[in-house]
Amino acid sequence: QVHLVESGGGLVQPGGSVRLSCACSGSPFCMKLMTWYRQVPGKQREAVASIGFLSTPIYANFVKGRFTLNRDNIENTMDLQMNNLQPEDSAIYFCNVRDSRSGTEYWGQGTQVLVSS
């Protein structure tokens, strides 16, 4: 059974920074594609950044160089450093691991980021 646990969300002022972490455990499935998504109530969940087991990160256009995604393949963790946060970045951020061939995927419980003064 794959288990994903996110941490690191919270309240941050505009222009501030937050680091989100995702720990994957329980299965070699954790070596699959890992992605951070975010969702605002009433809107669709959107991909923020993703990274494969041995690949470089891919970022959504709205990241615009503000976020940095790293993956530790030994610890099966994925960290998202988010800088210059703006109110529109406020959302619940979810960690996802997915097998691109089968479509099988698992989600974490989410961690909330609120950007507000």
Image (spheres, rainbow, N blue to C red):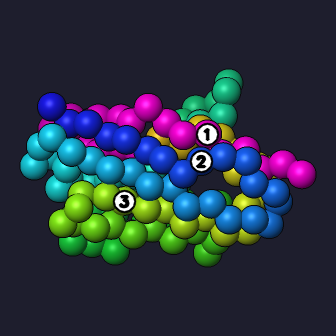
Give the residues in magenta: 95-117
* Badge number at residue 112: 1
Establish if 66 lies above or below 39: below
Q: Is residue 95 left or right of residue 72?
A: right
Q: Which residue is mark 3?
A: 78
Dividing the picture into quadrants, the one containing residue 13 is bottom right
The residue that appears at 34% across and 74% down in the rendered structure is 56
Label 2 element class: loop
Asked if the residues shown at circle 1 and circle 2 are in contact, with their CB atoms under 8 angstroms apart, the answer is yes
The residue that appears at 68% across and 24% down in the rendered structure is 42
Q: Is residue 68 or residue 7 the one in the foreground?
A: 7
Q: Is residue 77 left or right of residue 110?
A: left
Q: Residues within 10 Å of mark 3 (few under 14, many from 20)?
A: many
Q: Which residue is mark 2?
A: 9
- The answer to if 97 sits in the magenta stretch is yes
Label 1 element class: strand
Question: Going from the N terminus, do you reach mark 1 or mark 2 first?
Answer: 2
Amino acid type at circle 3 is Met
Amino acid type at circle 2 is Gly
Asked if the residues shown at circle 2 and circle 3 are in contact, with their CB atoms under 8 angstroms apart, the answer is no
